[in-house]
C-alpha cells in the first residue's frame, strides 16, 4: 500500500532513463496496477500515485502520461495469499512512439 520505490525498482528506472536517453524521440506512458484486495477506489488512487511517482522519478518530457488502473486488470482473487497477488501489483511502461 505504498508508493515508495524499492532498490530493485530504482535499477529498472535507471535502465529506462538510459533507454530514453539513447532514443530521444521515444515517448512512453506509465501504467500502474494493484491487486484485488481492498477498496476499489483506494486501489485506483494508490495506482495513480504509483504511476505518478515513477513519472516524477524519471523526470522526462518523454513521459507523456501516467495512469493508474487500480485492480481493473487484476487476475488473482483477493482471498489468495499475498505472494500469489504479487503478480497483479506492477507498474508498466508502454512506448507510444
Image: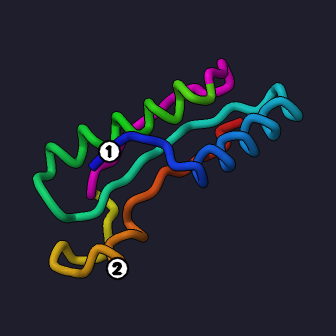
Location of residue 28 (image quadrant): top right
**5 w.r.t. 62: above or below:** below
- Label 2, secondary structure: give it: helix
**6 w.r.t. 84: above or below:** above
Which one is in front, 29 or 49? 49
Residues rendered magenta in the picture: 59-71
Query: What residue sits right under mark 2 in the picture?
Result: 84
Judge left or right: residue 91 versus residue 62. left
At 32% from the left and 44% from the top, the residue drawn is: 2
Q: Distance between the residues labelled 2 and 1?
A: 18 Å
Residue 85 marker: none
- Label 1, secondary structure: give it: loop
Location of residue 16 (image quadrant): top right
**Which quarter of the figure is the C terminus placed in?**
top right
Location of residue 37 (image quadrant): bottom left
Q: Where is residue 50 in the image (x, y as percent from the top left)?
A: 40, 39
At 22% from the left and 48% from the top, the residue drawn is: 43
Determine if the magenta segment contains residue 69: yes
Q: Residues within 10 Å of mark 1 (few under 14, many from 20)?
A: few
Looking at the picture, the colour scheme in use is rainbow
Query: What residue sits right under mark 1 in the picture?
Result: 2
Judge left or right: residue 83 versus residue 19. left
Amino acid at each position: 500500500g505504498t508508493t515508495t520505490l524499492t532498490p530493485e525498482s530504482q535499477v529498472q528506472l535507471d535502465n529506462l532513463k538510459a533507454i530514453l536517453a539513447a532514443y530521444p524521440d521515444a515517448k512512453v506512458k506509465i501504467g500502474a496496477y494493484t491487486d484485488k484486495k481492498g477498496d476499489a477506489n483506494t486501489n485506483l488512487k494508490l495506482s495513480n500515485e504509483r504511476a505518478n511517482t515513477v513519472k516524477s522519478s524519471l523526470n522526462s518530457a518523454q513521459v507523456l502520461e501516467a495512469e493508474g488502473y487500480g485492480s481493473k486488470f487484476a487476475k488473482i482473487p483477493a482471498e489468495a495469499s499475498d505472494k500469489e497477488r504479487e503478480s497483479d501489483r506492477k507498474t508498466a511502461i508502454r512506448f507510444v512512439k
